[in-house]
Image: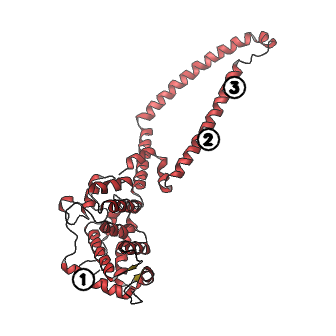
Amino acid sequence: MGNLVSVDPLDEKQIKKVSKSKVGIRELKAVKNELKAVAVSQGGIDLAHFKEAFANVGVSDEDFLEGFFKLFDDDGQAWLAFTDVAVYLALVGRETPEKKIEYLYRVHDVDGSGNLSPNEFKELGRNLAKAIKRIRGFPPGSKMDVSDMPSFELNEDEVEEVDAIAKKVYSGLDSNRNKELSYTEVQQKWGKSKPIAKIMEFVAPITAGLPQRVAESAENSGAASAKGSAKKGSKGKGSKKGSKGAKKGKKAAKASASSAAASDAGAASGASSAASAKPKKGSKGSKGSKGAKASKGYKKSNKEADASAASEASAKPKKGSKGSKGAKGAKAAAP
């Protein structure tokens, strides 16, 4: 923006923390729709609905959510305007400059005319400035101190500076000079506007540093931890118990072999009489038949289970399905 609301890049230390964010790109996108529905139904967003909306997209860390809510609660009334939240989510969570600008444009087209008036564009500029101050104050991944959260409202000097920049940018984008700024005009010229280009440069490394989905990152971590535990277990007490069990198994096998040999000797003594008689259908062969049927049933149930798993996987988000390999890791990964 200007000198008062800085868009100078964050330092490397701050950018590294972004990857530790409690919320990822996918959650930010999904929660926008949840919060919009809340705001439409009740005119704003309270803490309870804020938490519920994030819980619905898989984010439930109480401390994080209370701090994140406070980030937008400038007047301390525990009541948020959707636009404040939406502008922040667009800047941080939309992957490309074009998508960021498109959403910022749409959320400020209050009358739905398809054009932005000078006043609507001025409001966009002010909301952008507040979002930038929030990002600079508490970049994603940083710890939010609820007890000492400053207000990010613009002071008089900042309002004056932002309004002057917005007026200049609007004039440069409004090629028809009809005071109706269409999205097409914005698309065609935003890259030539230095203030807009600087804002996009400011948020680009932040968006790039965010995890795509926090749950996936945690699942991967949980899976790695489980593998590590398995390796330790194979070297520790479990392996000793296993070797003892193997020795006992060998002894039992020898005993079983002796018993089988005795049984074979008894069977040999009656071989001549058995040869003259036809084998009964219900003899040992019938047991084998049952075993074969059971085996077929097992294969069939496996096929049914595979078909069920495939059906269930197709109903879930594709990326989420990757974490299905380690159920334990997935449970531990829930934020």
Q: Dots 1 and 2: beta carbons under 8 Å?
A: no
Label 2 neighbour load within 10 Å: few <14, some 14-19, many 20+: few
Upstream in the sequence, badge 3 or badge 1?
Answer: 1
Residue with the mark numbered 2: 303
Q: Is residue 206 above or below residue 223?
A: below
Residue type pointed to by label 1 = Glu
Query: Mark 2: which secondary structure?
Result: helix
Residue with the mark numbered 3: 289
Question: Which image quarter: residue 195?
Answer: bottom left
| Residue under the image location 41 percent in, 68 percent down | 94
Let me know if residue 105 appears in the view.
yes
Q: Which corner quadrant holds the N terminus?
A: bottom left
Q: Is residue 252 above or below residue 57?
A: above
Of tags 1 and 2, which is closer to the observer? 1
Residue type pointed to by label 2 = Lys
Label 1 neighbour load within 10 Å: few <14, some 14-19, many 20+: some
Q: Which numbered marker is on residue 161?
A: 1
Residue type pointed to by label 3 = Ser
Residue 275 percent coordinates (x, y): 80, 13
| Residue under the image location 20 percent in, 62 percent down | 77
Q: Is residue 273 left or right of residue 71?
A: right
Upstream in the sequence, badge 3 or badge 2?
Answer: 3
Q: Is residue 8 left or right of residue 212?
A: left
